[in-house]
Image (spheres, grey):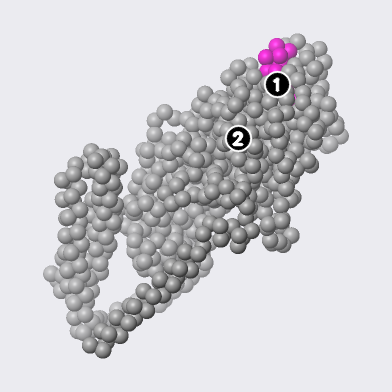
Amino acid sequence: MILKAKRTMYHIAILVMFAMLGQMFAQQTLDDVKKARNLNDDDVLAAVKTFMPRGGRDEYFAFVGTGNSGTMIVYGLPSMRIYKYVGVFSPEPWQGYGYDDESSLMLKKGSLDDRIYNYGDMRYPALSETNGEYNGKYLFYSDGANSRIALLGLDDFETKQVLTNPLFANCYPGVAVTENTEYVIQTSQYPAPWDNKVASTDNFDSQFKSGVTFWKFEDPKGATKSGHHIGRMLKEKSFTLELPPFSLDYFDTGRKGSKNFVVGLASKDGKNYVYVIDYSKLEGKASTTVNEANVISLKDGVAANAVAIIELPGMARRVKVTPDGKYFIVTGKEVMVFDFDKVAAALSKTSKNVAGVPAIDAAGVLKGKIDLGGMICDIAFDYRDGVTYASDHGGKKIVRFNYNTLKKEGEVALTFKPSMLMTPQGMSASPHSNYLVAVDKEGLYENYPNVGPVRPSFQHLIDISSDNMKDLYTMSLPQANIYGSVSVLRTTIKPIIRYKLGTNTRTGEISNFKTVAGQEKIERQGNRVHVFGTLIRSHITPEIVNVNEGDVVTFHLTNLERAEDETHGFTIDTYGKHGSFEPGKTASLTFTADRSGVFPYYCTEFCSALHLEMEGILLVKPKNWKGKAEKVVALTKEELAQYKKNYEKKVEVIKQTGDIIGGVVKFLKENDYAKYPYVKALVEDAFDQLEKGKFAKANYEKYAKEGKWKDAFLWAEQYWQYQVKTADVGLRAKTLLEEKLEGGK
Ligand SMILES: [Cu+2]
C-alpha cells in the first residue's frame, strides 16, 4: 500500500516536471529565438529555404571531387547535407575500396604499373547524357596526377572502372562527355613526351606533346546477371588527337548544332588560345598506334579540317558551351562569346597557323564581348534564354548577364571571393533556374572558427529564383578543393536498395564465390586456403578458421541480409584487410598468413544489437608447430540441464514468433499483397529468409532428439535469427500495404 502511494507521488512529480518544462519551451517563440540569436527576417527566410523537414527530400544531388584525396563527396541541394564519400582514385577503407580483392584488382588494372596509388587529383566531373540531358546513370572523373579516368555507376554510387591514359604523363583533372555519351573526353595538362619516353627539354617543340583523348563509351542495353547496367570505356575503340606542346586547361563539349565540337583552353610561350576540335572528322582515322592506343597525328587532324586554334587577347579562365549549343563563352578580363557556326565555317579556310595548328582570327568568329568590370573566374547558365552568372573573384560579387543581348542584368555583392560556379543541371541542355552554388577558399572566416593552418573550402548556396539573388547558406567541405561540381535532379537517379545475392559490385556479375546459408566451407589446396563464408545478423560463418603460417588465405564473404541498409564490415585483426558488405554483396579478402597467433575477425559496422556476436577466430599455427590437440572439456550435468532449459525457452519464443509471422502472412494474403510490386518484393525477401532458416530448424530438431542440448540450443538460436529477419521484413511489407490500402480509400 505504502509502495503504491509512493509510486503515485513519483508519477505526479514527473507530470509536474513535464508541465514546467512545457512552460519553458512554450516561451521559445520564433521571435524569441530571433532575438536571442540576433537574427533578422532575411536570416530566417534563408534558413527556412534550406531547412529539410522530416520526410523531405533534397531536390538535387551534387557531386564534388576531393582533389588530392581521390574520393568524391555527394551532397544534397538545397539542404547542403553530405550523404556520401565514394572512393574513386584512392583507397577508401570505410567501403573496403582498395582493400577487398575486387576493388583492388580494378584499381591495379587502372594503373600504369599494377600498383594502387594512394591519392589523385580530381576536379571537374561530368554526368552521362542522352540528347544533351543528364540521364542519371554514370559519372566520370579524370585524375590529373596519375593520368587516370574513372567511371562511376549511379545505381549504387560506386566506382566501376578505372583506366590509365596510355599516352599522357599527366592529365587535365576534368572531363566532358559528348551529347549522347558516345565519348568521354580527357586531355593532357602539362606537355611531355608521350608514352613515358625520355626527351631533352632542348627538343621541347619537337618531342613534347599535348593531346585530346576520346574514350569510347558503351552503355549496354541489357543488364548484367545481377540486374546492373554497367557501361564501359573501351581503349581499343578510343583515339587521341596529337597537339603541339600546349599547356591545356578547362574544356567543354558542344551540343545540338555544335554536338561534334570540343572547345578548350590552351597556352604556349605566354600566349593564350582556345582550341576547337570537330571529333566527327576524326573517327576511324587513326594514323598509328602508340602503346596500343589509336593516335591521330596533328598532320592528319589538320588535313581533315578537324582542328583549329583561336588566339585570345589575354589570360582566359574558363570556356563553356551555352545550353542552346550556339556559342561558347570564354571568360577572363573580358567575357567573349564565340559563334559555333562561324567557327565551323572558318575551319577549312585558315591561312595562318600556330605550331602547325590552323589559326582562326578571333574577330571573324566572335558574336560579341562584354566587360563585367573584373576578372571573371567562371560562368554558369540557367534555364532562361541567354541568362548567365559570372563570378567576379576580386570584386566579391556574382554578376548576371545575357549572352544574347550582351547586357548586364544584375549583381549580388558577397562577403567572399567567388570562384567556380554551378547551377543544378547546369552542364546539360536544360539548366535549372533556382540555385547557384559558388565555391570559395580564401574568405569567409567571419562565422567559421579557426581550425589551424589548413582550412576547409566553402560551397555557398545562392538563391537565383528571383531577380534579387540571395546568398542563403554556406557549407564547409573539408578535403574538397575549390574546384567545380555537377548537380542533377535527384529523381533522375534510380539507386538500388540492395544487391542481388552474390553480386560482385565492381563487375555487376554474380560472383563465382557467392555463398548461401548452409553452404559455407573451407577448401585447401597445398598452402592455398579458400574460406567461403556468410555474414548475417548475428553470425559470421564459419566462426573458426585454422591455417598454417605462410598459407595464402582468401575469405570470400557474402552478406545474406535482405533488409535495407544492413551492411556488415569485416576485418581480420592486424592483417590490414577490411571489407564492407552491403546486403547481397560478395567480396573477397586475400592475404598471406605470415604471422602466427590467434586473430579475431569481426564485423566492423554497428549492424544490430547483436553486433558484438559477429566475430570469429583465425588461428595461424606457427611453422613446425607440434602442439597436441587440446582436450575438449565435456559439459557437466548442470550445464547440460541449463542448455536444455535454454533450448526449451527458445523453442517457445520460436513458436510465438511463428504466430506473429502467421498473422502478418494472413493479412498480406487477405489484402492481395501481390498486386503491389514493392510489397511483393519485400514479402519474397521475407520468405527467402525463412527458407534459408530451414536447415537450422532441421539441425536443432535433430540435436534435441539426440539429447545434445548445447547444439540444439545454438541451432534454435540461429533459426530464430532467421525468423526475426523474416518478421522484420514482413512487418515492413505489412505497414507499406496498409499505407497503400489507406491511400486507395
Ligand atoms: Cu554486422
Question: Which mark is first along the chain, 1 or 2?
Answer: 1
Question: What residue does disc 2 label?
Answer: 466
Label 2's element? loop
Q: CA distance from mark 2 to mark 1?
A: 20 Å
Of the two numbered discs 2 and 1 in the rendering, the one whose residue sits closer to the viewer: 2
**Residue 193, label in figure:** none
Whether residue 288 is visible: no
Residue 129 image point, x, y percent? 53, 29
Q: Residue at x 52, y 67 (%)?
A: 574
Q: Give the left or right position of residue 423, taking residue 58 as reference.
A: right
Q: Residue at x 47, y 56 (%)?
A: 579
Question: What residue does disc 1 label?
Answer: 405
Query: Which residue of the protein is positioned furthest toward the bottom in this rendering?
Result: 2
Q: Give the left or right position of residue 146, taking residue 432 as reference.
A: right
- Asked if residue 338 is among those painted magenta in the image, a careful observer would answer yes
Residue 184 image point, x, y percent? 58, 31
Residue 484 image point, x, y percent? 65, 40
Residue type at tag 2: Ser
The residue carrying pointer 1 sits among few (fewer than 14), some (14 to 19) or many (20 or more) residues within 10 Å by Cα, namely few
Can you say whether 349 is above or below 643 in the image? above
Can you say whether 155 is above or below 208 in the image? below
The residue carrying pointer 2 sits among few (fewer than 14), some (14 to 19) or many (20 or more) residues within 10 Å by Cα, namely few
Can you say whether 18 is above or below 316 in the image? below
Quadrant of image for the N terminus? bottom left
Label 1's element? loop
The magenta stretch is: 336-347
Q: Residue at x 79, y 36 (%)?
A: 375
